Image: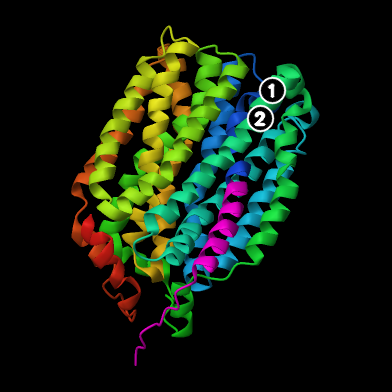
């Protein structure tokens, strides 16, 4: 006999404690993962020796992209683990892997010290980072959305994006701030190591916080009735349409995320020739603007629905990316600030509700696995590879506007997916799969998905 899981709703205080605890760990994860992008120029010269600085930078970005292509493997491993054994245990494990591997980057010998062994070790450590990051996103999104409950998922999961941005901002402030204070020569000699070494103590603090958390009420209800999925990786492919929708909706999310928060720094500094102080200020302003608008976007879609909002913002965001690159030739700090801030604003609004959308398209028992599978692939292809593709396009064509074709293509893919999104895609996630009772997700369809 199948028992209907009874969900004990957490109190407001329990929700706040959980959100703060989970978000703190998420912030450190993104600091760890993001600082590599800000230090790519120095890492390229330290580990990939070449007479051509563009070749060194391309090699460094290639390693950056490689770690993203490992992410789906991490998702395939940790996503099912979170659906079978629990969100909390998985979050603790991926944090240990991420913080430990980031700290090791800070003590790696360079090419000058050990030759070809240096880039090999760099690649291996970045693969561990990618593996752990692949397990983080599906687990943390499921964890927060399940704690939030219906009617609050947009607002609650938007804070995951806020903390991701703030983690990258923290990395950018440390990396660019050190460059501004000590100069490029000192950064190249040893300064690039410091941001990675900081990950050690930050990781210990985050680990302590995550060990204090409890699993989500929805997952505990499944455990108590013995209804957790025994084979989530196999079961999740019953949801092929939902997986495809998540994949393409996240395509723009991925590309515009790494355009604003990673590649813009290199574009302004190396391509447009802005000084490091200007780059630091502009990256900070763009990131802060994106973070500030995210909770408002989440609240708006909680009340008025996801699809119309995301579709409009996807169109405007694609137009903003066109402006970003077409404004490049002859740009000055005074002229380039506007396309940068426009792109950042629309990135923040779009990313405000993508996590909530994908959590609502998948049922509780395979939610972590589904997000891990459908999210990590577009992030690898269109996000992590974006800096490398943009750098390569400019190097091959000699045209600094050439990356626009790649970024616009990602926007069009998401626009098509959002047009295809329909109300029944949300209500489908509330229907039972195998033995799961409907009560866990039915209210989601009634309160959130029905407004899509």
Query: Residue drawn at (32%, 22%), measured in percent from left and top?
Result: 322
Quadrant of the rendering where the C terminus is positioned: bottom left
Q: Tell me if residue 36 comes above or below residue 15 in the rendering.
A: above
Dot 1 lies on which element? helix
**x and y percent of residue 120 in the render?**
67, 38
Query: From where the camera sits, is residue 130 visible?
Result: yes
Image quadrant of residue 265?
top right
Q: Is the magenta stretch mostly helix, strand or loop?
A: helix
State the extent of the magenta-drawn residues as a range: 1-29
Q: Residue 175 carries which label?
A: 2
Query: Which residue is located at x 70 percent, y 39 percent?
Result: 196
* Dot 2 and dot 1 residues touching (CB under 8 Å): yes
Query: Which residue is located at x 19 percent, y 55 percent?
Result: 422
- Disc 1 crowd rating (10 Å Cα; few below 14, some 14-19, many 20+) is many
Q: 149 left or right of 312?
A: right
| Mark 2: secondary structure | helix
For residue 364, what is the image quadrant? Answer: bottom left
Q: In which quarter of the image is the N terminus?
A: bottom left
Q: Mark 1 points at which residue?
A: 179
Residue at (25, 38) in percent of width and height: 312
In percent of width and height, residue 417 lies at: 24, 45
Q: Is residue 117 visible?
A: no
In the image, residue 181 lies in the stretch drawn in magenta: no
């Amino acid at each position: 006999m199948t028992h209907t899981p009874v969900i004990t709703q957490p109190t407001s205080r329990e929700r706040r404690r959980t959100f703060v605890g989970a978000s703190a760990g998420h912030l450190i994860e993104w600091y760890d993962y993001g600082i590599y992008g800000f230090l790519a120029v120095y890492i390229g010269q330290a580990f990939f020796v070449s007479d051509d600085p563009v070749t060194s930078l391309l090699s460094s970005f290639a390693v950056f992209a490689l770690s993203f292509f490992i992410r789906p493997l991490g998702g395939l491993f940790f996503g099912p683990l979170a659906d079978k054994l629990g969100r909390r245990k998985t979050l603790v494990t991926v944090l240990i892997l991420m913080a430990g591997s980031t700290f090791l980057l800070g003590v790696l010998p360079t090419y000058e010290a050990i030759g070809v062994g240096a880039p090999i070790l760099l690649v291996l450590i970045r693969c561990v980072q990618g593996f752990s990051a692949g397990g983080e996103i599906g687990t943390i999104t499921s964890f927060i959305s399940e704690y939030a409950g219906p009617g609050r998922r947009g607002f609650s999961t938007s804070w995951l994006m806020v903390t991701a941005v703030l983690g990258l901002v923290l990395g950018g402030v440390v990396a660019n701030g050190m460059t501004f204070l000590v100069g490029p020569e000192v950064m190249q000699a040893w300064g690039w190591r410091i941001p990675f070494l900081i990950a050690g103590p930050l990781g210990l603090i985050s680990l302590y916080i995550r060990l204090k958390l409890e699993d989500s009420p929805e997952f505990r209800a499944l455990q108590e009735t013995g209804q957790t999925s025994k084979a989530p990786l196999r079961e999740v492919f019953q949801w092929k349409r939902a997986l495809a929708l998540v994949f393409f909706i996240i395509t723009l999310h991925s590309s515009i995320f790494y355009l604003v928060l990673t590649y813009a720094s290199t574009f302004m500094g190396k391509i447009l020739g802005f000084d490091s102080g200007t780059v630091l200020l502009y990256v900070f302003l763009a990131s802060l603007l994106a973070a500030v608008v995210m909770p408002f976007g989440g609240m708006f879609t909680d009340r008025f629905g996801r699809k119309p909002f995301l579709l409009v913002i996807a169109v405007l965001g694609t137009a903003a990316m066109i402006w970003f690159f077409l404004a490049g030739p002859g740009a000055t700090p005074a002229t380039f600030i506007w396309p940068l801030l426009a792109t950042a604003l629309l990135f923040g609004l779009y990313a405000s509700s993508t996590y909530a959308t994908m959590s609502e398209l998948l049922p509780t028992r395979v939610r972590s696995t589904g997000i891990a599978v459908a999210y990590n692939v577009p992030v690898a292809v269109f996000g992590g590879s974006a800096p490398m593709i943009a750098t390569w396009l400019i190097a091959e064509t000699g045209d600094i506007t050439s990356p626009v074709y790649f970024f616009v293509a990602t926007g069009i893919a998401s626009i098509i997916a959002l047009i295809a999104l329909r109300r029944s895609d949300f209500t489908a996630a509330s229907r039972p799969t195998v033995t799961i009772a409907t009560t866990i997700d039915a209210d989601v369809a009634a309160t959130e998905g029905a407004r899509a």
